Amino acid sequence: MDRVDKRRLSTGKREVIPRDTAVFDEHALLMNLALSMSENHSGTIAMRRRNFLGAAAALGVGAGLSACTPRSGEPATDMPDISLRDRDLPFIATEETYTTRELIVLNAINADHAEYLEDTGLADLGAGRIGAMDEAGVDVQILSAHTPGVQDLAGQQGNDFAYRLNKMIADGPMTAYPGRYAAYATLPLQDPEASADELERAVREDGFVGAMTNGFVGRKFLDHRDFEPVLARAQALDVPIYLHPGYPPTEVFDIYYRIERAGYNDECQDYIFSGSGYGWHQEVLTQCLRLIMTGVFDRFPRLQMIIGHMGEGLPFYYERIVEDLGESTAGSLNRPVGQYFSDNFWYTTSAFFQDELLQLLLKYISADRVMFAIDYPFANMKEGTDWFRAVDLPRETKEKIAFRNAEKLLGITV
């Protein structure tokens, strides 16, 4: 969708979305429960900050797309010689988004916005998505729930919702299209112990390949001691955690991203500013640095994290980070700062289909640690594969990025 009507961001009466067109909805994830959690006593939507942020996420997730000022981009039409050489290149796409009707009800602002989320194709895990994968030459998608997943649900509600969502993915599309889908587990991070147990269950019982998190949980990043059960379990299971961005707490949003000037009244742009337009990338890199500086990887030396969007700005800042933080942390960490980026992190190309950015990433990070990703449906799948086929790198290096590194890290094959 090229343009999104801003009127979709206005509040209004929530409407129940019909179930008769649901995709893989056989588990019936209690839409009425989600409705009751999202409505206030008068029956109208409670316009919570996070609800609006869920909307902004849908309008600009990861791909740098803006509901206010859409980017244009057509798949490449020219096919240079190197693309012909690599036209048979397999692809594992490692950051691809989905939603369900229940997640839409939970995180959408109103019925109009819920309709928009459906229009994106997020909920299509059947023939439509598989057809787009075939057209682009994508062999496998690694699925993850649309941000913020169930991270805002505390207690047993969050635990139950995460379990049902993961089971729906395992028993639905992963079963219907064997070998075409894998998934990161959705975790109820308000309850770290339950999250650790659900991660283990999803990996051992349903073959999930790791977990995805979405920014802050309450006022905490994953370096907080509360989340050590999750980190310890991920290390024990030998599966990675994908650090997807989320939106900041209210006070951070107000200080950094809320724009106030005469005649300016576009809240949508404020949220894009705090999200895919800028803030998300700073947030992920900040979390990565906190994980290093608080000693998380000294306590869990085999723990592996994935970050997207061509390193979330790390390549640009790399030399200053390594020099300045390396000097200030000397003696307090087990390894030099730069070594953690080489030993404990993996990086994906999601939504950043630019040769120059890939070259900069590879200047500092080994090609053995870089994986292909699209950020579908917020980035064009065929545009992503066409771009990478044309990248001027040795075939061996391109195979590592396109699929071999993902096979190694995630334990899947194409």
Image: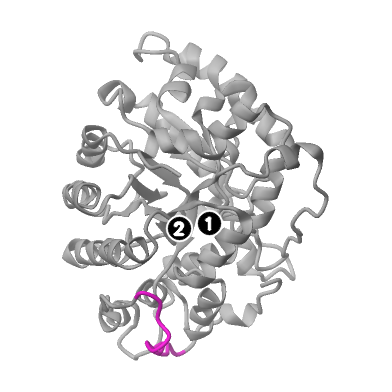
Image check: 49 left or right of 85?
left
Q: Position of residue 158 (x, y in %)?
A: 24, 63
| Residue under numbered circle 1 | 254
Is residue 17 in the magenta section?
yes
Residue sitting at x 25%, y 63% = 167
- Figure coloring: one colour
Residue sitting at x 76%, y 61% = 72
Residue sitting at x 67%, y 42% = 388
Above or below, 403 against 216 in this view is: above
- Callout count: 2
Q: Position of residue 414 (x, y in %)?
A: 46, 44
Q: Position of residue 253 (x, y in %)?
A: 51, 55
User: Is disc 1 surrounded by few (<14), some (14 to 19) or many (20+) residues within 10 Å?
Assistant: few
Extent of the magenta region: 13-24
Above or below, 243 against 235 in this view is: below
- Which quarter of the figure has residue 230? top left
Residue 142 appears in the figure: yes
Image check: 49 left or right of 390?
left
Q: Nearer the viewer, residue 253 or 340?
A: 340
Q: Amino acid at mark 1?
A: Asp
Residues at circles 1 and 2 in contact by the CB criterion of under 8 Å? yes
Q: Position of residue 133 (x, y in %)?
A: 56, 59
Residue sitting at x 34%, y 13% = 334
* Secondary structure character of the magenta stretch overall: loop
| Residue under numbered circle 2 | 250
Q: Amino acid at mark 2?
A: Thr
Is residue 261 in the magenta section?
no
